[in-house]
Amino acid sequence: MAKARSAPDVWMIGSVALILVIGLVMVYSASAVLAFHDYGDKFYYVKRQLLFASLGIGAMIFTMNLDYWIWRKWAGLALLVCFGLLIIVLIPGIGVVRGGARSWLGISSFGIQPSEFMKLAMVLFLAKLLSQNQQQITLFTKGLLPPLGLMGLAFGLIMMQPDLGTGAVMMGASLLVLFIAGARLKHLASLGLVGVAGLVGLILAAPYRLDRITAFLDPWQDPLGKGYQAIQSLYAIGPGGLVGLGLGMSRQKFNYLPEPQTDFIFSILAEELGFIGGSAIIILFLILVWRGLRTAVYAPDTFGSLLAAGIIGIVGVQVLINIGVVIGLMPVTGITLPLVSYGGSSLTLLLTALGILLNISRYSR
């Protein structure tokens, strides 16, 4: 498909670059104490994060210059491979358990998380499927049910690990693609009711999820157990005030707040940089989401529009859940802050996906 290609969205590039730089600084600040205690090297985590960021930037530059239509050809294969990986990771002895979830494949400390790849593969396949059959999306049986079946199967495999956070991000981004493709609101509302019922069932089926709900409603019922993370997160954010305690001056990273470099890195950022620093990172994410949605609106074709919406949906939903958990608006679930939290496969893959989004922006009207 021959179309004139222009420069990629500079607002998007600028926001991604700034968020990434802030993330590297905060990974070092949040992890230095833990890294020195565990590995004798306070730069242990930030060096690894810099490595994966470099790989991700290289991948982003590559996909930014690769015409996005080529991904339509490989969408089916990508989804099939991701389903295979989600099955393989569940096999004892092959899948690696970290943080209570069997969600990793790899050797020693290096590994990949198949569920992260599924998020991108799902929105990629949905963009292809719905762009080819957009007229049928208003029909529940022929148009909406097939993609819902794929989404449900992927979500079920992810929940077998279990990893509710990643599953929720995949479902949220996928539902955004369905909505933009033209799915009827009454169908989506009905599915929402079914989803709520299913979520209640998942909570009741696993006692630890019910514990998270009760801890969310009143963390002080068990301040040293179920409510510990939520309370320590608020203890970090509260003293930050307007301008923060200063970069590197966090108190909660001294083994009070678990995993400060991953799920709760926003707590450390707010503690050290205050309301101003926390607001700045949120504004940068809002700029990124705005430019991503703008790219979706002005994409030259339906496939590009749906793919752009799905990619920026992954970012937006994940930011919403992570910050919601950190500030106490949602129950605790293990999910990282995009481009900021420490993480190898998630960071590299997200930068790759943002490269695809930037390529779509090059063809925007």
Image (tube, rainbow, N blue to C red):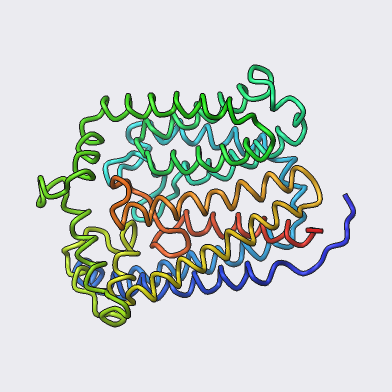
- The reply, left or right, for residue 279 in relation to residue 208 is right
Q: Residue at x 74, y 62 (%)?
A: 65
Residue at the limit of the structure toward the bottom, as seen here: 246
Query: In the shown orientation, is residue 230 left or right of residue 325?
Result: left
265 vs 182, nearest the viewer: 182
The quadrant of the image that shows the C terminus is bottom right
Most foreground residue, 56 or 260: 260
Image position, residue 204 (x, y; %): 26, 26
Q: Quadrant of residue 131?
A: top right
User: Considering depth in this image, is 329 or 38 the residue closer to the camera?
Assistant: 329
- The residue sitting at the front extreme is 186
Residue at 63% x, 25% y is 144
Residue lying farthest top? 141
Residue 263 picture location, percent across and down: 33, 56
Total labels: the figure holds 0
Where does the image place residue 86, in percent across and percent down from the top left? 46, 34
Q: Residue at x 34, y 39 (%)?
A: 102
Give the quadrant of residue 239.
Answer: bottom left
Vertical side of 238 occupied by 131: above or below: above
Q: Is residue 96 above or below residue 255?
A: above
Q: Is residue 272 left or right of residue 125?
A: left
Place of residue 100 in the rendered image (x, y in percent of width and height, measured from the top left)? 27, 42
Residue drawn at x 75%, y 31% as measured from the top left: 134
